[in-house]
Image (cartoon, helix red, strand yellow):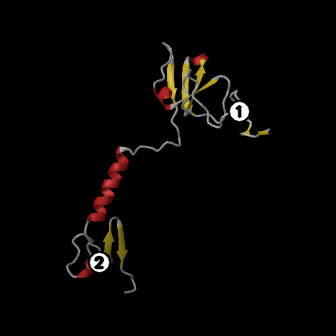
Amino acid sequence: MESRRGPLKSAVPSNIVSLVRRCSRTACGRPAVATLTYVYADSTAVLGPLATYAEPHCYDLCAEHSERLTAPRGWEVVRLLDGSAPARPSGDDLEALANAVREAARPQERAAGGGGGARSADPMEVARRGHLRVLRSPDN
């Protein structure tokens, strides 16, 4: 309904549901990032990534409340990893990266270049880069 002052504005807040789900904790309005479910038969609280849709017996929690979550005495908290989170590199990943950088920094040795390659004992080998070798054609 239009009035002379512009569109009619309601004095009562609307009950339109927001597309962003909010934390279930009282007085917390932050966006939810995780869903908490209780498995009473196993005395377990399961905290996982935000569920696809809200369910009546699950609780959506913001990042702060999900990090500070504690369970009742005698209960276990199971935290499921979120697959969308970036994985942190392991020690093996970092070692493999360091080895690749070292290998790339080494000067290339060429057996055909005049000095003779100390690495190359095979007369068919022309050049080498890491574990890859360039071999001379057997027809030559």
Q: Is residue 29 above or below residue 101?
A: above
In percent of width and height, residue 74 lies at: 49, 13
Q: Residue furthest front?
A: 4
Residue 127 lies in quadrant: bottom left
On the image, numbered disc 1 is attached to which residue? 16
Q: Is residue 68 above or below residue 125?
A: above
Q: Residue furthest left?
A: 115
Quadrant location, the N terminus: top right
Q: Is residue 136 above or below residue 7?
A: below
Quadrant location, the C terminus: bottom left
Residue at image location 29% in from the left, 77% down from the top: 123
On the image, numbered disc 2 is attached to which residue? 123
Q: Residue furthest right?
A: 1
Helix, strand or loop at disc 1?
A: loop
Mark sitting on residue 64: none
Residue at image location 55% in from the left, 26% down from the top: 46
Residue 132 lies in quadrant: bottom left
Residue at image location 65% in from the left, 22% down from the top: 57
Check disc 1 and give the amino acid type: Ile
Q: CA distance from mark 2 to mark 1?
A: 79 Å
Q: How many residues crowd around disc 1 within 10 Å: few (fewer than 14), some, or many (20 or more)? A: few
Q: Are marks 2 and 1 in contact (CB under 8 Å)?
A: no
Residue at image location 36% in from the left, 80% down from the top: 136
Q: Earlier in the sequence, mark 2 or mark 1?
A: 1
In percent of width and height, residue 3 lies at: 77, 39
In percent of width and height, residue 34 lies at: 55, 32
Q: How many residues crowd around disc 2 within 10 Å: few (fewer than 14), some, or many (20 or more)? A: few
Check disc 2 and give the amino acid type: Pro
Q: Nearer the viewer, residue 28 or 139?
A: 28
